[in-house]
Image (cartoon, helix red, strand yellow):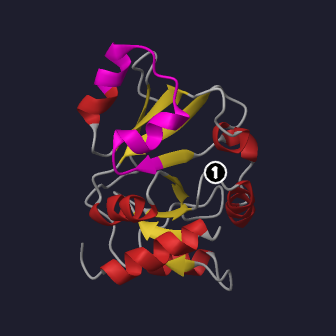
């Protein structure tokens, strides 16, 4: 996990519970995250990025149980497909539960989800006690930040807190698949 300590993780989890936005390393790029059930935090994250709420967001988790409440997975085959690819750098577009907040799924009936194998990102989700919003740490339309320095340069003066760590070994952002059709979207 590098130099990300338990103290850093406890502080980051506390900040998420308080509605703050954090920057943290993921498999290929730096991410921005917040508490997915806190509409005010999500609105702040979207404003920071300049991202439309209609696009939806990704939820990142340490295990399937952390994202399951947000999903409507009735098919055992679909669940098996998801579980077979996780933890790992695969994002799935999955039907969302009817009570999933619209600020997460945008104008769709699906939600993007990933169970990460990245040690810092997974430890953050475990310390927080649930899934977190995860979106690349860049203004909408700009290339994703692959270093903490680049992420800091994108958001000067934002009072954004950074969880120590380094991105994983992925060269490209994670692959995205549609869970209903199996089609690769990215």
Quarter of the view holding residue 34: bottom right
Residue 22, x across and y down, in percent: 54, 71
Callout 1 crowding tier (Cα within 10 Å): few <14, some 14–19, many ≥20: some
Q: Which residue is mark 1?
A: 37
- Residue under the point 60% across and 52% down: 36
Identify which residue, 120 or 174, lies in the foreground: 120
- Residue under the point 63% across and 71% down: 18
Residue 46, x across and y down, in percent: 70, 57
Secondary structure at numbered mark 1: loop
Identify which residue, 3 or 147, lies in the foreground: 3
Query: Can residue 163 be spotted in the picture?
Result: no
**In the image, is 90 to the left or to the right of 24?**
left
Identify which residue, 166 or 147, lies in the foreground: 166
- Is residue 40 part of the magenta span, yes or no? no
Q: Which corner quadrant holds the C terminus?
A: top left
Q: Which residues are magenta?
A: 60-81
Residue 28, x across and y down, in percent: 36, 58
Residue 75, x across and y down, in percent: 40, 13
């Amino acid at each position: 996990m590098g130099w990300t300590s338990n103290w850093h993780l406890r502080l980051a989890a506390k900040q998420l519970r308080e509605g703050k936005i954090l920057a943290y390393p993921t498999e290929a790029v730096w991410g921005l995250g917040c508490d997915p059930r806190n509409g005010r935090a999500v609105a702040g994250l979207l404003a920071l990025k300049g991202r439309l709420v209609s696009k939806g967001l990704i939820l990142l988790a340490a295990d399937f149980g952390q994202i399951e409440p947000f999903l409507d997975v009735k098919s055992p085959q679909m669940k098996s497909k998801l579980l077979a690819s996780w933890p790992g750098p695969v994002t799935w577009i999955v039907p969302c539960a009817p009570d999933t907040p619209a600020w997460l799924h945008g104008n769709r009936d699906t939600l993007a989800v990933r169970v990460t194998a990245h040690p810092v990102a997974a430890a953050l989700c475990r310390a927080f006690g649930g899934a977190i919003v995860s979106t690349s740490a860049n203004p909408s339309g700009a290339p994703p930040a692959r270093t903490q320095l680049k992420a800091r340069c994108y958001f000067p003066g934002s009072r954004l807190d950074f969880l120590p760590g380094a991105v994983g070994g992925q060269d490209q952002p994670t692959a995205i698949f549609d869970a209903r059709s199996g089609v690769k979207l990215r």
